[in-house]
Image (cartoon, grey):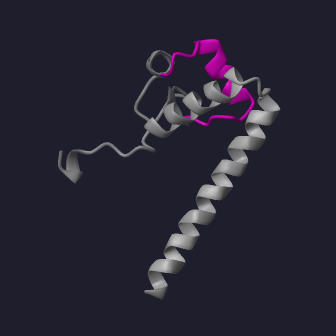
Amino acid sequence: MTDSHRVRSDLGVYSISVASELSEVGLQTLRLYERRNLIRPHRTAGGTRRYSENDIARIRRITELVATGVNLPGVDRILSLEDECADLRAQLDTCRAGAE
């Protein structure tokens, strides 16, 4: 597949029903996760949710954490720390690339 045909992983393309099927999480649970700000799907001008590949991966991560007994506030904290760590790693990679 060429780069021009590749779908960006942050592009919201899936409806809530497709996201539910792909992530094996119920519709109401997805809505709950959104109310708790654990996921933030893109919204169309008409208000329809559109989930990206990144959103689906995040939902799967939430499912893993919940399955181990972590409550939703704990999931929120873990995801925040994981996001912060990923941002710091990206900054480090940029610094290393500039030093070469």
In the picture, which quadrant includes the N terminus? top left
Q: Position of residue 44 (x, y in %)?
A: 49, 33
Q: Position of residue 72 (x, y in %)?
A: 77, 28
Q: Which stretch did the figure color magenta?
A: 23-41
Please indicate whether residue 19 sits to the left or right of residue 61 in the image. left
- Pick the front one: 44 or 33: 33
Please indicate whether residue 45 sits to the left or right of residue 88 in the image. left
Q: Is residue 56 above or below residue 88?
A: above
In the picture, which quadrant includes the C terminus? bottom left
Task: Determine the residue located farthest toward the front in the rendered image.
Answer: 68
Task: Determine the residue located farthest toward the bottom in the rendered image.
Answer: 99
Q: Residue at x 57, y 70 (%)?
A: 91
The number of numbered badges drawn on the structure is 0
Q: Position of residue 96 (x, y in %)?
A: 50, 79
Q: Residue at x 71, y 47 (%)?
A: 80
Examine the structure image and report whether residue 35 is included in the region drawn in magenta: yes
Asked if residue 44 can be seen in this view, the reply is no
Q: Residue at x 62, y 24 (%)?
A: 63
Q: Is residue 36 above or below residue 16?
A: below
Examine the structure image and report whether residue 57 is included in the region drawn in magenta: no
Asked if residue 51 can be seen in this view, the reply is yes
Q: Position of residue 27 (x, y in %)?
A: 58, 14
Q: Residue at x 71, y 35 (%)?
A: 37
